[in-house]
Image (cartoon, rainbow, N blue to C red):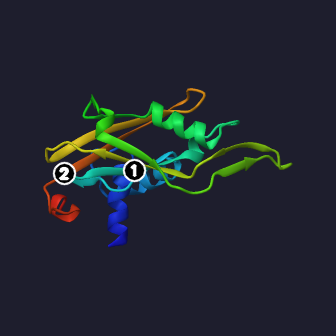
Amino acid sequence: MHQKMMGILICAMLHIFPSCDAMDKVILEQSFSNSTWIEFRSNFVQIGDWAYAQIKQAAIWELGDNRIGLERQIQNSLRIEIDGLVSPSSKYFLSDVLRPPVYVRDYQGNLLGSHGEIMDLYFEVPPSAGEHIATVSVFSTSGRPYSIVWSFTVVAAGQNAEEANPP
């Protein structure tokens, strides 16, 4: 069961292949390990639910960044598009996991900056069942863009992934 759910998760990570057969899963597993800045939890979302992803601050951190400044930058630059339409900020929210900052130091112990661990991103999904495309993007403090396209399926309330996508 865990492997099947992991396969479903991996297929949602990067919208490279429209289908998700065994070969796609192998290729996507390799890509998944290189997709370090954001991780989606499932590619199936029930109508009325919110999609969930985790933004990894360490992957966006740059020399001199501090946790508060980086979190503000991510919050201020976050852009979500669903099926090509920009989602207003009332349709998503971003929260920081309350943990101590991670301090980045050089080999001599000099402080280079800090960042948080992860930020939880929740966003409202379309109220219609079927295939949808989300684009999530942010900018680092220097303006470097981070963006990912995610294909997901909205299923009827009470329907699970196996019912929506039979083998």
Q: How crowded is the residue under tag 2: few (<14 C-alpha within 10 Å), some, or many (20+)?
A: some
Residue that lies at the very extreme toward the top in this rendered image: 143
Task: Describe residue 159's horizontal placement relative to residue 23 as left or right.
Answer: left
The residue mark sitting in front, 1 or 2, is: 2
- Quadrant position of residue 137: top left
The mark that comes first in sequence, 1 or 2, is 2
41 or 8: nearer the viewer? 41
Tell me if residue 140 can be seen: yes
- Quadrant position of residue 161: bottom left
Q: Label 1: state its secondary structure.
A: strand
Q: How crowded is the residue under tag 1: few (<14 C-alpha within 10 Å), some, or many (20+)?
A: some
Tell me if residue 15 can be seen: no
Q: Which residue is mark 2?
A: 48
- Placement of 41 over or under 85, stated as above or below: below
Which residue is painted at 50% across and 37% down in the image? 74
61 or 44: nearer the viewer? 61
Which residue is painted at 30% across and 53% down in the image? 43
Which residue is painted at 86% across and 48% down in the image? 108
Q: Quadrant of the C terminus?
A: bottom left
Which residue is painted at 20% across and 50% down in the image? 154
Q: Quadrant of the N terminus?
A: bottom left
Task: Describe residue 157's horizontal placement relative to residue 4 as left or right.
Answer: left
Hey, what amino acid is under mark 2?
Gly
Q: Measuring from the top left, give residue 20's x and y in whole percent.
A: 30, 53
Structural distance between the alpha carbons of marks 1 and 2: 17 Å
Q: Label 2: state its secondary structure.
A: loop
Hey, what amino acid is under mark 1?
Ala
Per the rendering, the mark at residue 53 is 1
92 or 25: nearer the viewer? 92
Per the rendering, the mark at residue 130 is none
For the residues bearing labels 1 and 2, Cβ distance under 8 angstroms: no
Q: Measuring from the top left, give residue 109's x and y in whole percent.
A: 83, 50
